[in-house]
Image (spheres, helix red, strand yellow):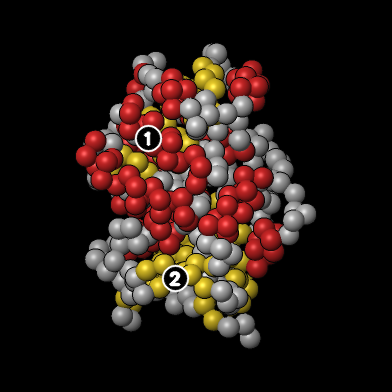
Amino acid sequence: MGSSHTVAVFGAYGHTGRFVVAELLDRGFVPILTGRDADKLRALAASTPGPDVDVRPAAVDDPAALDRALAGAAAVINCAGPFATTAAPLIEAALRAGIPYVDVAAEIEANLDTFAHFADRATAAGIAVVPAMAFFGGLGDLLVTAAMGDWATADEAHVAYGLSGWHPTAGTRTAGTVSRERRDGRRVVFGNGRLEYRDDTAPSLEWAFPEPMGVRPVIGEFTMADVVTVPSHLAIPEVRTYMTVEAARDLAAPGTPAPAAVDAHGRSAQTFLVDAVVRSGGEERRAVATGRDIYAVSAPLAVEALHRVLTGRTRTVGVASAGAIFDAPAFLRALAPHITFELLGDERAVAHEPR
C-alpha cells in the first residue's frame, strides 16, 4: 500500500489511540505507532494483527524525533492528551511535513489555542488542521451544523448529552485538571457571542430527550468543546451544553473506575444519545445521534475525517471544525453502524428547572 495510506498515530497506546489504530487497520490504512513510551508502543505493535507496523518513539519536546515519526506519513492523528501540551508541537510537526493533522481534543482551552495560533499558517500552507474530531467537539458540531440546514444564522444552539454513565480514562481526568487550572477553577459558558468565565454553580435542569430516553435531570451549562467548534463557523450567539446527572456524578467521583471492555472490540457498555437543537425566532430544528462508548466512537469520527481530507472531500483548508470542513449530514450518515443519526422535526425540546 502506498504512502497515501500511511497514518501516524501519536499516543497510539492510549485508550482512544488503540481504538483509532484498530479503525485505521479495519479501513485499510497502515498506522505508524508513535508516542513518548517506546515500551508501550512495542507492546501494542506486538499485539496488532496483520503485517509488522512501524514503531517510532517521539516526545513532544523533541522536534527532530517528531519529524522522524511523521516522515513518509500522509497524515497524523493526535490521540495524546493533555492537548494543551501535545497539540501545538504536533501541529508544528505536521506543518513542517506538509501533511494534515487531526486530533481528538476535548479540552476547550487547547482547541482555542489551535484556532488562535495556527489558523493563518495552516491556511497559507493549504493544510487541513481539524481539532476536536471526537465525541466532544466534533460530533456536537456536526449535529448542530446538520440541524441548521439552510439557515445562515440562529438565535441559540443546545447540545444535550444523554450518557448512561461515564467511566473516565486517566487521560480524561488529567485533561480536566489541566483545563481547570488554566481557567483558575472557574466554569465557562458561551453567551452573547463570546466565552464567559463564571464562579457560580451550574444550574440543575431537566431536558426532554427524544424517546425512549425522555425527560432526564441534567447539569445545565456543563460546557464541552462544542462552545469552540460551533461558534468557529456558525453565527450563533448562544451555545449551551448539558450532561445527564448520572454521567456528571461519575466523572466527578474520584473512585469511578476507568471504562471496562465488554465486547471483542474493546467497547464498554456505556450508551449515549446526543440531542442537538437550534432555534431561530419561533422555529426549532433538531438532530440526534445515538451509539455506544464515547471513547470508541471517537475512532470512526477521527478516521472518517482523515479519509475525507485525504480524498479531497472538504470545503476549506486551514484550521477548521468538523462542521465547517465537511458536509455534516453526509459525514454523520457515513458513520453507520457506529452511530445512528436522525434529523427530527419541531419537537420543542426545552431545558427547564426540575419540578
Q: CA distance from mark 2 to mark 1?
A: 29 Å
Q: Earlier in the sequence, mark 2 or mark 1?
A: 1
**Which residue is painted at 53% across and 57% down in the image?**
182
Where 174 falls versus 228 (above or below)? above
Residue 14: image location, x then y, percent: 61, 35
Question: Pointer 2: residues within 10 angstroms few (<14), some, or many (20+)?
Answer: few
Whether residue 25 is visible, yes or no, is no
Q: Quadrant of residue 354?
A: bottom right
Where 259 falls versus 97 (above or below)? below
Q: Secondary structure at mark 1?
A: helix
Quadrant location, the N terminus: top left
Residue tagged 2: 196
Pick whichever, 62 or 5, lies toward us: 62
Residue 179: image location, x then y, percent: 55, 55
**Which residue is painted at 59% across and 71% down in the image?**
219
**Which residue is painted at 50% across and 32% down in the image?**
61
The residue sitting at the left extreme is 124
* Mark drawn on residue 92: 1
The residue sitting at the bottom extreme is 355
Q: Secondary structure at mark 2?
A: strand
Where 131 falls versus 205 (above or below)? above
**Which residue is painted at 69% across and 51% down in the image?**
167
